[in-house]
Image: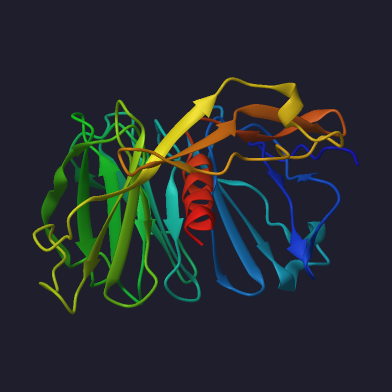
């Protein structure tokens, strides 16, 4: 399949349907210098945002209603600005997108798609950050954003009124220092769970917030204690860990318990190829690796 060349962005997609993955990656064009952010507001809509080679943010959408035009993809459009890390994006309603990014001044900024247009400009939430933001929504109008400050401590801020109700300033979640972007998720209204990898020894830590057990402001004062769920260690690249058909690493070591009551997950950093081009990477500094760690530990416990 010939690679498309749409805009200055490059990324690949791989679809999962009817219990199986498509056999091949398909390119949607251009060059990207950071991981993409992607979200969906319906079963027939995908939105993707990336940092282009010009360090600006670019957006593209796939819409089933446009399937007869360019296979459903819109053209790439620039959202302007200059950014340091991967963006974060969520949708809490149909025709609504919220995008957060760290600009060239290390400030957190945000912008929204409001039904039929983008908000007029990027607005700043300030502070100084050294990681990508992590963004989650548990319902309409609610946003919780996390990032690491210059001391690598986790900061959190929330909004529950469509950008107008930002609660307090950024608050510190505990006193631990972390390597990179935390991973936040909400499994129910009023519930937040956050995971992050600690600096130094690579321990994976978890904390949670529940509105039924504390203040409804989630301003950082009612978080649960941090708990360790294991250690993450990354081995050097090894060709033996890559399957013969160029797929992902064939195996991940099961966690083993230790005298410190922690578990160790070993994975392999490697780049695999599909049709002769690099298409998938598992790295020591990625949220995908963190997800693998969590999944491996869960398997061990089960």
Rendering coords of residue 38 (x, y %): 54, 55
Of the pair 190 and 145, the residue shown nearer to us: 190
Q: Residue furthest right?
A: 1
Of the pair 152 and 204, the residue shown nearer to us: 204
Give the left or right position of residue 41, taking residue 62 as reference. left
Name which quarter of the figure residue 84 lies in: top left
Rendering coords of residue 212 (x, y %): 18, 79
Residue drawn at x 35%, y 72% as measured from the top left? 138
Give the left or right position of residue 75, taking residue 100 as reference. right
Of the pair 61 and 155, the residue shown nearer to us: 155
Rendering coords of residue 206 (x, y %): 30, 52
Name which quarter of the figure residue 64 lies in: bottom right
Q: Is residue 22 visible?
A: yes
Q: Quadrant of the N terminus?
A: top right
Give the left or right position of residue 88, taking residue 177 as reference. right
Residue drawn at x 30%, y 65% as measured from the top left? 192
Residue drawn at x 23%, y 72% as measured from the top left? 161
Residue drawn at x 27%, y 29% as measured from the top left? 105
Q: Is residue 120 visible?
A: no
């Amino acid at each position: 399949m010939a690679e498309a060349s749409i805009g200055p962005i490059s990324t690949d997609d791989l679809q999962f349907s009817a219990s199986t993955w498509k056999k091949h990656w398909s390119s949607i064009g251009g060059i990207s210098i950071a991981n993409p952010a992607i979200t969906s507001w319906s079963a027939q809509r995908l939105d993707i945002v990336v940092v282009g080679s010009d360090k600006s943010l670019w957006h593209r959408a796939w819409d089933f209603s446009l399937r007869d035009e360019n296979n459903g993809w819109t053209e790439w459009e620039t959202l302007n600005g200059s950014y340091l890390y991967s963006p974060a994006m969520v949708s809490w309603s149909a025709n609504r997108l919220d995008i957060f990014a760290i600009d060239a001044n290390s400030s957190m900024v945000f912008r929204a798609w409001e039904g039929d247009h983008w908000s007029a400009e990027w607005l700043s939430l300030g502070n100084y950050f050294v990681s990508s933001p992590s963004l989650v929504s548990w319902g309409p109008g609610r946003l919780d954003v996390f990032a690491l400050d210059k001391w690598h401590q986790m900061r959190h801020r929330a909004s529950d009124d469509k950008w107008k109700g930002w609660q307090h300033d950024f608050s510190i979640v505990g006193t631990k220092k972390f390597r990179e972007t935390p991973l936040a998720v909400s499994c129910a209204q009023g519930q937040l769970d956050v995971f992050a990898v600690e600096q130094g020894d690579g321990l994976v830590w978890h904390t949670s917030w529940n509105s039924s057990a504390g203040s409804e402001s989630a301003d950082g004062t009612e978080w649960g204690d941090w708990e360790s769920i294991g250690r993450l260690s990354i081995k050097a690249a090894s060709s033996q860990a890559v399957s013969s058909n160029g797929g992902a690493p064939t195996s991940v070591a099961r966690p083993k318990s230790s005298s410190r009551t922690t578990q160790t997950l070993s994975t392999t950093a490697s780049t695999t190829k599909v049709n002769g081009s690099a298409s998938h990477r598992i790295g020591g500094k990625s949220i995908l690796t963190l997800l693998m760690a969590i999944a491996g530990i869960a398997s061990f416990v089960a």
